[in-house]
Image (spheres, rainbow, N blue to C red):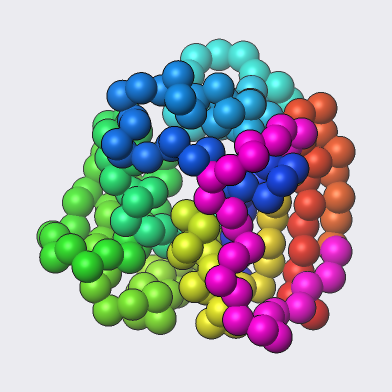
């Protein structure tokens, strides 16, 4: 059966995104881009990621690059929230970087939006359970990635359906922003450490459900 997993980067003080990384401040990147760049520098430098987004030749190879490749290959469908989609809609290239069906949790009614390269965004008004049902059907034998943001990840943790957490812990401090682990119902799901990979710009932690 397909696994449901979270794969994200996290600051040392527990934030997924800096406070000013919002649509309101999107065109003043000096307010948030330095923090975001520091958080994601480990990923941007990987060869497989650069190839996927058409950044040109070069990039790092090795264990972290293999980890990124595995995440891409295992993913058969993505789920995200409206905020993440809206930010991506104005910043992703025409060939969006998912290459799978993407299910967007929203109250907006909108027809599916197909992009070159196999990405189609589906807008789901019926809640996280319905989005997961559709994602499972689309993914087949592959896995479902809960892409973000923090609120969406919290919803799926509270539903008790997350099988794995993959966290790239970057050595940066935000001080404020959107925390990953808030508004969780107790007792929450229990995880065990599966693997730890020390990279030059992040520590890659993998937890699996007990």
User: Main SS type for the magenta part?
Assistant: loop
For residue 138, what is the image quadrant?
Answer: bottom left
* Residue 180 visible in the current orientation: yes
Left or right? Give the position of 165 relative to 119: right
Q: Nearer the viewer, residue 108 or 173?
A: 173
* Residue shown at the point (39%, 75%) measured from the top left: 128
Q: Position of residue 204 (x, y in %)?
A: 77, 45
Q: Position of residue 168 (x, y in %)?
A: 71, 44
Q: Position of residue 199 (x, y in %)?
A: 82, 33
**Which image quarter is the N terminus in?**
bottom right
Residues shaded magenta: 170-193
For residue 172, what is the image quadrant?
Answer: top right
* Residue shown at the point (24%, 73%) measured from the top left: 125
Q: How many marks?
A: 0
* Residue 143 visible in the current orientation: no
* Residue shown at the point (53%, 50%) measured from the top left: 178
Q: Position of residue 210 (x, y in %)?
A: 79, 80
For residue 43, what is the image quadrant?
Answer: top right
């Amino acid at each position: 059966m397909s696994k449901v997993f979270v794969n994200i980067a996290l600051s040392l003080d527990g934030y997924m995104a800096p406070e000013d990384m919002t649509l309101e401040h999107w065109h003043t990147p000096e307010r948030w881009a330095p923090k975001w760049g520091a958080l994601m520098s480990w990923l941007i430098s990987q060869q497989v990621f650069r190839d996927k987004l058409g950044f040109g030749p070069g990039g790092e190879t090795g264990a972290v690059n293999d980890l990124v490749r595995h995440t891409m290959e295992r993913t058969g469908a993505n789920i995200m929230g409206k905020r993440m989609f809206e930010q991506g809609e104005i910043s992703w290239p025409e060939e969006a970087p998912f290459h799978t069906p993407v299910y967007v949790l929203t109250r907006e009614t909108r027809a599916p939006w197909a992009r070159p390269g196999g990405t189609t965004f589906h807008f789901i008004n019926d809640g996280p359970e319905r989005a997961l049902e559709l994602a499972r059907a689309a993914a087949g034998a592959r896995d479902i990635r809960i892409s973000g943001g923090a609120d969406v990840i919290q919803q799926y943790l509270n539903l008790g359906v997350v099988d794995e957490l993959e966290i790239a812990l970057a050595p940066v401090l935000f001080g404020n922003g959107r925390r990953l682990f808030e508004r969780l119902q107790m007792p929450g799901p229990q995880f065990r450490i599966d693997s730890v990979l020390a990279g030059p710009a992040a520590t890659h932690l993998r937890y699996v459900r007990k």
